[in-house]
Amino acid sequence: MKISRREMLQSMAAATAVATLAPRNLFAANDDMAAFTGEPAEATKKVVEALGGMSKFVSKGARVVIKPNMGWASPPVQGANTNPIVVRTLCELALNAGAKSVLVIDNPVQQLEPCMERNGYKEELHKLSDVVCKCVRDPKFFVETEIPKGRHLQKADVLRALLECDTLINAPVAKSHGSALVTFSMKNWMGAVHNRGLWHSSFDLHQCIADFSTFIKPKLIVLDASHVMTTKGPGGPGNSLALWRIYGGTDPVAIDSVAVTLAEWNGKKLGPNDVPHIKIAAEMGVGAIRQAELPVLPVVA
């Protein structure tokens, strides 16, 4: 599967349109959250810098794992996957901070090789030394793990690499979802487990998302909202809104509660308490819902 000429032209046009945008802070950064709008690489750097710099999260010699959403065989302009430029920038920042190695890993929904070819990760990451990028599905990469605080989800087969690293970075994309309403930082962890189908078929999906979030503790969250899939998520193709925004923080509930205000999702305007897994996670002490009025910025076509 190859990127079509039309898709390539769309990506080039979008990149040209945003090239002149300097990173712009959306609201005042504090100790746990920052947000910038602009070209994805520069906006990502600004977000990490505002949070204290990558050295705050990555120590010298650390083994770093980045968990993006790269589960779909579609180009970045469609918004189904985390923009690979955002992830490449995080890899570069981690290596510059002294990381020994960086692993980018996901359990994709679609076939492994088409995902890697079409989502742009192979192209963006192959030149970086000490960076390995993997899409995996083989059970050997997972280990059965207890979820001590889980109400419904009390165990899961989790990617072993996430449990053994020194620094875990969650790098989700913002998009709509047919079952979970939206998928931001907490929902992104479904790509970290082997048996995620059980979350849909055997339990309450929203409770499982909240349950797993009581267990998994990334040191840094960087949410890609450069292209936001507002309809027909998670796979699309759906309506893709070019917002050119990057959010960063350490509190998944705060990140998700702000992200839900970015757009209408499948035609509905939602607040944090309208998304059950955000509300449940807050009640379970995962983090705090953040009420924030964000300025409406021009959308780059």
Image: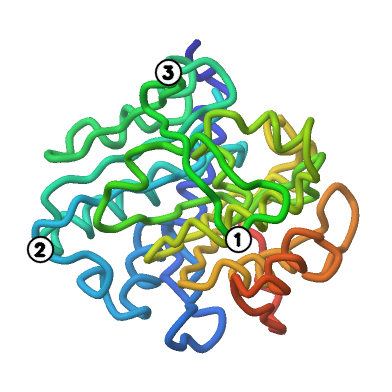
What's the amino acid at mark 1?
Answer: Lys
Residue 240: percent from left, percent from top: 69, 43
Amino acid type of disc 2?
Answer: Lys
Horizontal side, residue 43 vs residue 10: left or right: left
Q: What's the residue at 24%, 56% (across, down)?
A: 166
Residue positioned 31% across, 55% down in the render: 90
Q: CA distance from mark 3 to mark 1?
A: 27 Å
Callout 3: few (<14), some (14-19), or many (20+) C-alpha neighbours within 10 Å? few
Query: Element type at marker 3?
Result: loop
Residues tagged 3 and 1 counted as in contact (Cβ below 8 A): no
Q: Which residue is mark 1?
A: 149
| Discs 1/2, front | 1
Q: Position of residue 238 (x, y in %)?
A: 75, 35
Mark 2 crowdedness (10 Å alpha carbons): few <14, some 14-19, many ≥20 = few
Sooner in the amino-acid sequence: mark 2 or mark 3: 2
Q: Position of residue 27 (x, y in %)?
A: 56, 84
Residue under numbered circle 3: 138
Q: Position of residue 50 (x, y in %)?
A: 36, 80
Disc 2 to disc 3, how far (Cα)?
31 Å
- Asked whether, in this view, residue 59 is left or right of residue 120, the answer is left
Residue at the right extreme of this rendering = 268
